[in-house]
Amino acid sequence: MSRDIFVVVEHVEQSVADISFEMLGRARELAKTTGGRVVAVAVGHDLKPLACELGAADAVLLSEAPGLAQYTPEAHQRALEAILRQRAPRVTLVANTAMGMDLAAGLSGALGWPLVAYCREARMEGDRLIAVSQIYGGKILAEAAVDGPNAILSVLAGSSPADAGHAPGSPAIEEVEPPAPSPARVRFTRLLKPEAGDVDITREAILVSVGRGIQSRDNIPIVRELAEALGGTLSASRPIVDQGWLPKTRQVGKSGMTVKPKLYLAIGISGAPEHLEGMRGAELIVAVNTDPNAPIFGVAHYGVVSDLFEVLPLLTEKIKATT
Amino acid sequence: MNIVVPVKMVPDLVEELEIGPDGRDLDRSFLRLRINEFDEHAVEEAIQLKEKHGASVTVIALDTGEVDETLFTCLAKGADRALKIPGDFAGISSHGAAAVLAGVIRSIPHDLILTGVQAPDDRDGQVGVLLAEALRVPHVSVVSGVEPVGEEAVTVRQEYAGGVMAELEVDLPCVLGIQAARQAPRYAPVSKVRQTMKTAKLDEMPAAGEVPGAGSTVLRLAKPESGGGAERLEGTPEEIADRLLAILRDRGLVRT
């Protein structure tokens, strides 16, 4: 039985995503207790320039073909499936991203290996793999013992430091023959970049961000007024954008933008993991929410448990009075 | 085109979640359930496609409790058929739900399967992807914007981080994990849902075969350290606003 820990490297446009380094760091910890190697696996085309960044791994497996240059769930899953079936690592770490959601569950279904999703911690207790998931919008942690000799974990971004996955050195690269191309049922046509025109929230120093707690579109002006008083910009969590209350360009979080402003004022945002991923790097985080157990308070520096319609207009008024 | 939309009831996250006495599951006795928000988007996208291009929309749910009203609501919104799979499915794993759904969907016409990209409780992975694997059809997660290309395929947009998206063409049949419908899910007035309950009926189809587990066993549930690093500001709204102003001022975030 293999004791190796595999990390599926996520990369976009020839650059390794941060989450891959976080996973490499986590894999190193796990490999210490299994006594196996850390193996980075990358699927794509022309990947050798990336491999030199993966010094934290003991070995790098590359599955390369021109047809794999652009990610598609089907082709990349097939390439990974062939590798995992043959090498049967003890644990395979996949990022809990758009691509990772496809791949982790797809591989679990195809290989019949258990999957623990939204994983935020993992450790070995003897031969047993223990994984902690963050579920119910970040409100509950579930610690589980994982069955079987092989398992897949889809790992939440920001759940371990990326530093541990950065190391010098050039691990041995092994090239793996990808599966023979078959007629693709999923075909990449083009990459769409965000539309310019609206503000770029990743460049703003002050973001006043609004979430579901605002209850109605009609209440957005209350928050907008505060943003304006602060000289900041209005941003939002996903539900607000999905409702069409603010444009997609304002969305903070996993499927939106990652922001690092000087001030992030979270208004009525509960703080699902997908949202925290996009804003936890802000210098100062202030959260206002009616729910004292909202996960947003876990990352905020200052928290206000209050009806936002009481505090916000007062704060706006006071700011206006000082400036 | 036959569109099938598996939907799922999940705990309403607006409510306080309590952990049950054995510490391994939520206390389900007072749990308020609602349709998974992403599934609501999948239903909306299906009805939008029907209205624009013509299609038959079948909404399907495992009976995890309280599904009838949700299914009638989907009919009131414009779905053509609602299918309930009876059984004791409360707390079923994603692997289990995918296997049951695959068994039923195999026996009904299905070209396009739309479901929510994820659910708050899919601890062992997203049902849509697992369903696609069980049906041996392609899948794409985190999708917004579905458009038919002739009778045989659809184009979809898959959302990545930073607002970047890929456009993919996917052969039918396939499963798409919907992130957001092209417009916010429509609202069905209670009166219309009540009317639908009187005039329409839910079809039932039994589950067949083994129901696999999650492949892991929950040892315990816990609430994350509440508060964590946050310093709580307390007092009257007036006092809180003053404190906030002082904090912002100290950091030079408010001009003085």
Image (cartoon, coloured by chain):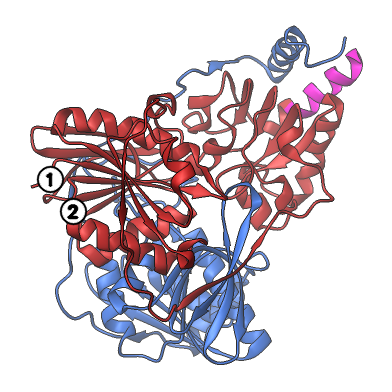
In-front residue for pair B152/A163? A163
Q: Quadrant of the C terminus of chain B?
A: top right
Q: At 65% from the left edge and 51% from the top edge, which residue is drawn? A: B163
Alpha carbon of mark 2 to alpha carbon of mark 1: how far? 8 Å
Residue denoted by label 2: A87
Residue denoted by label 1: A2
Marked residue chain, label 1: A
Q: If you read the primary sequence from the N terminus, does the residue marked by circle 2 or circle 1 appear first? A: 1
State the hue of chain A. Answer: red
Q: Is residue B177 left or right of residue A252?
A: left
What secondary structure is found at the residue carrying circle 2?
A: helix
Whether residue A126 can be seen here: yes
Q: Position of residue A319 (x, y in %)?
A: 84, 19
In the picture, residue A59 is in which quadrant?
Answer: top left
Q: Which chain is blue?
A: B
In-front residue for pair A304/A206? A206
Q: Position of residue A250 (x, y in %)?
A: 72, 45
Q: Position of residue A257 (x, y in %)?
A: 64, 43
The magenta-colored residue range is A312-323
Q: Main secondary structure of the magenta part?
A: helix
Mark 2 on the same chain as mark 1: yes
Q: Is residue A284 above or below residue A101?
A: above
Query: Which amino acid type is shown beneath numbered disc 2?
Result: Arg
Q: Is residue A245 left or right of residue B119?
A: right
What secondary structure is found at the residue carrying circle 1?
A: loop
